[in-house]
Amino acid sequence: MDRRAFLATLTGGLLAAPLAAEAQSAGRVYRIGIISPTSLFPEHPSHAFRQALRELGYVEGQNVIIEQRFAEGQAERFPELLAEAIRLKVDVLVVGSTPGVLAAKRATATVPIVFAGVPDPVAQGVVASLARPGRNITGISMAIGEGFAAKWVELLKEAAPSVSHLAVLWNSTNPAAATFVKEVQAAARVLNVKLDLVAVGNVTQLDSAFAAITASPARDVIVTADPFFYTNRIRLVQFAASRRLPAAYFVRDFVDAGGLMAYGPSLAESYRRAATDVDKILKGAKPGDLPVEQPTKLELVINLKTAKALGLTIPPSLLLRADQVIE
């Protein structure tokens, strides 16, 4: 064999293995189940997940199929939605919210689960630890540290110094909600602010809550983190505007919808980072060996247009600390 023929044979052999592996990989179509606590809309956090998957080389309809189901803010729907996804033989489940991932944990011990938008997965019994979650679960925590919820009170007091009586919306069916309430209560005691705790878990209770707040002396509102409130964010923002109530929320989507201010992690970023875990799992990693990631940033977003409508002058010191000011 002459030198040219030898080199051609050698080169062909070296290229054959990766090309064959690529062809084999290309022939596999993965199925991902996304169980979302809220319905789909243009800025839904799962869009960030899909975009991140595309950047990792996954093309819907070619090498991945996404089965997405929505709980519409109703935690009781999670078991049926998860059962449906499992029947479809998904390779991995992506689940949002504390109620969602707890339902997923009960539904399967074998299908890999990646969670997003869960405030404290260790305290809520989702995983054994952040470093070694164990079982078939990992994900992106929104654990924001002790005292996080207290910032809602402090920031609202700074934006509206006359705050003296707050209505706090919380969902008693959400295991994570009790921590938020305790921290809000602690901050209120320090700042000498009275609280009305208003438990809401469904649309009927939301209507009753609006009536109760309207009849109460509370003149400001805090909406704690919960999928039900996220689903109904337009109604919540519109109610606050109609009653001229300064309000603080847990994610910027409320502010984009016209709310006054929000402080918390980015849901979109949580879902984007979840895509990386999904990619690792599809390539053979065990979920329980992948450390749970935590937020890298908390964002403060303020809507100046809403502030002006409420007759508020936001202090320059607060505006300087904001990650974004909507004018």
Image: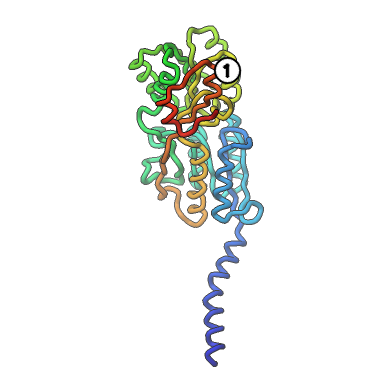
Image coordinates for residue 255, horizontal then vertical, percent = 54, 28
Which is more toward the observer, 305 or 204? 305
Determine the residue positioned at 55% across, 23% down: 305
- Nearest the viewer among 263 and 73 is 263
Q: Quadrant of the N terminus?
A: bottom right
Q: Tag 1: Cα neighbours inside 10 Å, few (<14), some, or many (≥20)?
A: some
Which coloring applies here? rainbow
User: Which residue is the extreme one toward the left?
Assistant: 190
User: In terms of image quadrants, where is residue 143?
Assistant: top left
Tag 1 residue:
241
Vertical comparison of 66 with 101: above or below? below
Tell which of 169 and 84 is nearer to you: 169
| Residue sitting nearer the eye, 135 or 257 | 257
Q: Position of residue 58 (x, y in %)?
A: 59, 54
Q: Position of residue 263 (x, y in %)?
A: 45, 29
The quadrant in which the C terminus is found is: top right
Q: Secondary structure at mark 1?
A: helix
The relative height of residue 142 versus residue 177 in the rendered view (above or below) is below
Question: Which residue does the image show at 36% across and 45% down from the upper left?
Answer: 131
| Residue 126 visible from this viewpoint | no
Give the quadrant of residue 180: top left
Question: What's under tag 1, amino acid-wise?
Answer: Ala
Q: Residue furthest front?
A: 316
Residue furthest bottom in the image = 2
